[in-house]
Amino acid sequence: MEQVLEEEKPPGMTPFFRARNIEKYLELKKVFFKFEGASITGTQKDRISRLHIKRAKEQGFDTVAVATCGNYGASVSYYAALEGVKSVIATPSYYSGTRNQEIYENGATVMELNLKYEELLDYMKDKTRDENWYDCSPGSPNSAVDIMGYENIAYEIYNQLGHCPSYLAVPVGNGTTLSGIYSGFRKLYRKGMISNLPKLIASSTSLGNPVVYSWRRGLRRIQNLEPSVITETHVNEPLVSYRPTDGQKALNAIIESHGIAQAVTDEDMLRFSRIIEKLEYIQVMPASSSAMAAASHILSRKTQEHDVVVVLTGRGDLWTTR
Ligand SMILES: Cc1ncc(COP(=O)(O)O)c(C=O)c1O
């Protein structure tokens, strides 16, 4: 029988399990973890990187590029190397990304630019057009692929759980992951495969994200923030943003699902990542643990029967900055 190498397996089918120790400790009803951190490069980004690289190849590009703060760059450079495509990974120069070594080892060209992440996204839009590179960045003309990639998380949860959960907790930076997973559940609902949609619990940083800001104020149109009001830290970096590329989509999904957006402090992200490690024996990136922190905050007061799936997007040993 032909042996399937680890690298040849498509990203996905990440572990799903009931977190009974957490349930007991936090006095919650049924809690399930969808551990995206078990992906090859350690985050949910693998789901979309591979799709982008395949699409770039089909369209005849020999180079892919991305604006990133680390995790996505590690993933894009990995899958580009696997498929024999060149990759250009652009990062803000003020990050000293702990994943840069890995990105170099994947054979990527690293561009460090003195720009904020949101400015870098704009810069790469022009640069990729001028250089005839395929742009994998969030919000690029190719970003429909992202929603498709993340819809698979919803299909897997449905298959692994056997139904649609009453709540789904997801960390939000640009809002792409949450929008994509919700889009997957909507498709299942339209096909008649599930009879409800999950209420979304969108977790983000207390130090600046327009999705939480706009939801809290009851706004239907996302209100972006002034760059000066957000504070980026080592902990909140994947979630902090003044202009999230899919903020409107995420806000629409939260409103439609009658969900909640919850701001989480760095201290709580760190605390919950320690709790998860101690009780469930997996290392989870603090920003990803924000989803558990938010779910705990929101569901601890609910008395009626419910279940929650918490999407843990990243592994704990992969902090990207400083
Ligand atoms: C590990 C991790 N979790 C969550 C997020 C947030 O995802 P999104 O930007 O799709 O909202 C990111 C984004 O970089 C991330 O790296």
Image: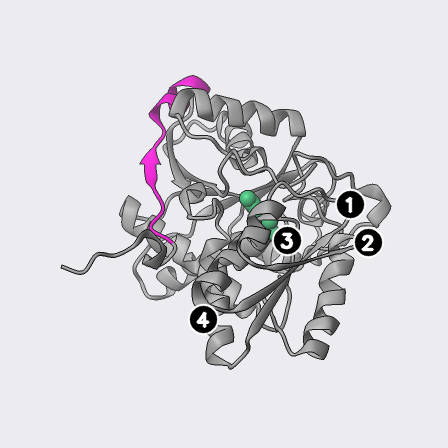
Compared with 281, 73 (above or below) is below
* Residue 83 falls within the magenta-colored stretch: no
Q: Nearer the viewer, mark 2 or mark 3?
A: 2
On residue 114, the disc is 2
Q: Which color scheme did the rendering employ for the protein? A: one colour
Pointers 3 and 4 in contact (C-beta within 8 Å): no
Pointers 1 and 3 in contact (C-beta within 8 Å): no
Which mark is first along the chain, 1 or 4?
4
Judging by the rendered image, the residue that carries numbered circle 3 is: 174
Which residue is located at x 34 percent, y 42 percent?
15
**Type of amino acid at the residue the image marks with label 1:** Tyr
Judge: label 4 CB < 8 Å from ligand 1: no
Which mark is first along the chain, 2 or 1?
1
**Type of amino acid at the residue the image marks with label 4:** Lys
Q: How far is disc 4 from disc 2 in space, using C-alphas?
A: 30 Å
Residue 160 in the image, given as x and y percentages of width and height = 29, 46
On residue 54, the disc is 4
Residue 24 in the image, given as x and y percentages of width and height = 38, 19
